[in-house]
Amino acid sequence: MAPMRVAPVLDGKQMPDAGGRCLEVLNPATGKVIAQQVCCSGDDLARMVQSSQRAFRSAEWQKLTPADRGVLLFRLADAIDAEAERLVEMELLDSGKPISQLRQVELPFAAALLRFYGGAADKIEGAVKNTPGGLHITMYQPYGVVAVITPWNYPLVNAVMQVAPALAAGNAVVVKPSEETPLTTVALGELAAEVGIPAGIVNVALGLGPEAGRDLVVHPQVKNVSFTGSTEVGQLGLAADQMKPVNLECGGKNAIVVFADADLDRAAEAAVFSGFTNCGQLCVSCSRCLVAELIADEFEQLLLGKLSKLKVGDPRDEATHVGPMITRPQYEKALKYMQQAPKEGCTILAGGGKLELPGGLAGGFWLQPTLLSGVTEHMKVAQEEIFGPVLSIMRFAEEADAVRIANGVCYGLSGSVWTSNVERVGRMVQALDTGIIWVNTMLVGYPQIPVPPHKMSGTGIELGMEAVLAFCQRKSAVINSDQTAPVGWDLG
């Protein structure tokens, strides 16, 4: 089958005449080219932002009530449901994710996000303060044109996670997906127009981050930026010169903490699921497994038993649990960490290198799910984000040691605690410096639960009603009701 061709989406339609370079899109399961994407030139980006600015200011958009915007988001959710199999096929080709993961989790979650924010659109509330001599009103208003830059690990979900609250708040959006995985975001831009969202309200820019992403962020008509990706890129601060608010969701080096009184079988299941879902390419996954010394040997055996049942392979097989690494650079980076791990002094209990698969999968970006034992807190594998299928097992003696080790990284995105001690639950939830903590569960997420990153994991917030407010600018008004009060020096 010849590679498909995808282009930026302007006013609801692809732009095959865009003036930027062409880039190949690879299927990570096979290493073969599945698409040629036409990228934006600088002029294309400017046209796109101007289109969104016109659309935002148009009577068609401005006359819509918040409830009307909500209806449009509900329609987009229905369209995703109706087009689910087509979107699954695109995402499968683009990212190599197991088809069961796409059908059962990611497509339903994308639709659920749209429905949640559709319902949230008319629930943005300000406040009235009782101040002397008048009323003090605080309100929330849309910024106008916002830029959304998404990564390659969850292409459709990440796009919807930002676009939905931005539209609920009343903004226009220019979204730039990763050049590695553009297919479903292009489809999202087209679907938005098909369900009646005005042309230009959702535009999709394609291109490299240092080019198209940078041009988008620094454009003066872009008033708000949401970026999901690496901490290194988030630190660049490209929007700082123009004082633009920036919502950053970046890296994580998260810990699952298992105490001796936990349900060890369930905790081991959670650790394997967290460490290897999406081949470890999930920012909120727990890649460090902190285990009480008293039960560490037993727990390692439980992990090995769970790991032996994982099926890694063909994404089209409903029984597959783990697919390939999504990009070649990330594949090479994770492989390098695997190869360096024994040199740091830890032990490879399972995996530790490339995974050789037969037939059409032989050219894919396959790695073995890897368990590392004897990891100490100052090793690179314990401190640096690998973003691959590597679970590092670390031992602790006391609760205070677990807290110190868990907090002893520069990130603070998520964490998980496993214990039957209710008092310890309260202490650990307070002590762990992360934005979300799961207790006796793992990776449970709902649209209404906010995830606010701590430390070098980012700024701002994702999900929840709080995400809508992140796309709103605050305004106060003081309305005088005392005509006898002086307004200055009372000059007469």
Image: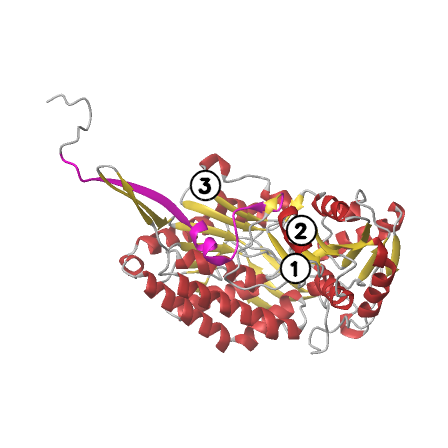
* Nearest to the observer: residue 193 or residue 246: 246
- Would residue 425 be counted in the magenta stretch? no
- Residue at figure coordinates x 61%, y 49% from the top left: 250
Q: Which residues are magenta?
A: 456-483
Q: Is residue 82 left or right of residue 433?
A: left
Nearer the viewer's eye, disc 3 or disc 2? 2
Residue 426: x percent and y percent? 63, 53
Query: How many marks can you see?
Result: 3
Q: Secondary structure at mark 1?
A: strand
Amino acid carrying label 1: it is Val
Residue 169: x percent and y percent? 39, 55
The residue that mark 3 highlights is 244
Q: Earlier in the sequence, mark 3 or mark 1?
A: 3
- The image quadrant that residue 269 belongs to is bottom right
Q: Is residue 242 above or below residue 149?
A: above
Amino acid carrying label 3: it is Lys
The residue that mark 1 highlights is 439
Nearer the viewer's eye, disc 3 or disc 1? 1
Q: Are marks 2 and 1 in contact (CB under 8 Å)?
A: yes
- The image quadrant that residue 389 belongs to is bottom right
* Residue 118 numbered tag: none
Q: Is residue 133 above or below residue 67?
A: above
Q: Are marks 3 and 2 in contact (CB under 8 Å)?
A: no
Q: Is residue 487 above or below residue 102?
A: above
Q: Earlier in the sequence, mark 2 or mark 1?
A: 2
The local crowd at label 1, few if under 14, some if 14 to 19, many if 20 or more residues have their Cα within 10 Å, is: some
- Residue at figure coordinates x 50%, y 75% from the top left: 81
